[in-house]
Amino acid sequence: MKPEQQPAGQQDPLSPSVSLLVKLGSLAVHIEEIISPSGHPFDKDAIKTLLDDAEVISWLKAMDAMAMLPVKR
C-alpha cells in the first residue's frame, strides 16, 4: 500500500512513529535475550505483550499488505 493510499489516521508503515520504533527496538532486545543462554521467561512474556500491542499489529498488517514481511510457514 502506497503512503498516499493509507486510510485516514493510519501512519505510513515505512515512517513509523517514535513509540512504534521503541516497541520494535524492545522486541529486538527481548528476542536477543530469550535466544541467549541466560534467557528469562520474562522476555517471552514481554514479547507476547509487544506482539499484542495495537500499534504493532497495525504496523505488521500494513507491512504485510506491502509484501515487506516474510510469509509465515
Image (spheres, rainbow, N blue to C red):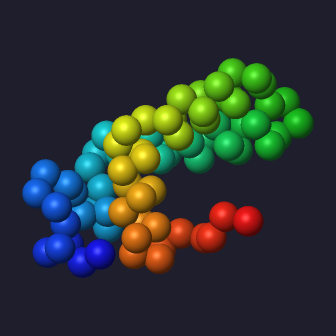
Give the quarter of the image for residue 46: top right
Quadrant placement of the N terminus:
bottom left
Q: Is residue 5 visible?
A: yes
User: Is 24 located above or below residue 72 in the figure?
Assistant: above
Q: Nearer the viewer, residue 43 or 1?
A: 1
Q: Nearer the viewer, residue 65 or 24?
A: 65
Tell me residue 64's x, y (percent).
46, 67
Q: Residue furthest top?
A: 42
Residue at image coords 61%, 41% = 29
Q: Position of residue 21 (x, y in %)?
A: 38, 48
- Where 10 sits versus 6, above or below? above
Q: Quadrant of the C terminus?
A: bottom right
Q: What count of labels does the image hold? A: 0
**What x and y, as percent, mark residue 30?**
64, 37
Q: Residue at x 47, y 74 (%)?
A: 68
Q: Is residue 65 above or below residue 51?
A: below
User: Percent from the top left, x then y, of residue 41?
Assistant: 76, 23
**Does 25 sit left or right of 20 as displayed?**
right
Which residue extends farthest left?
Answer: 8
Q: Residue at x 19, y 66 (%)?
A: 6
* Res 22 seen here: no
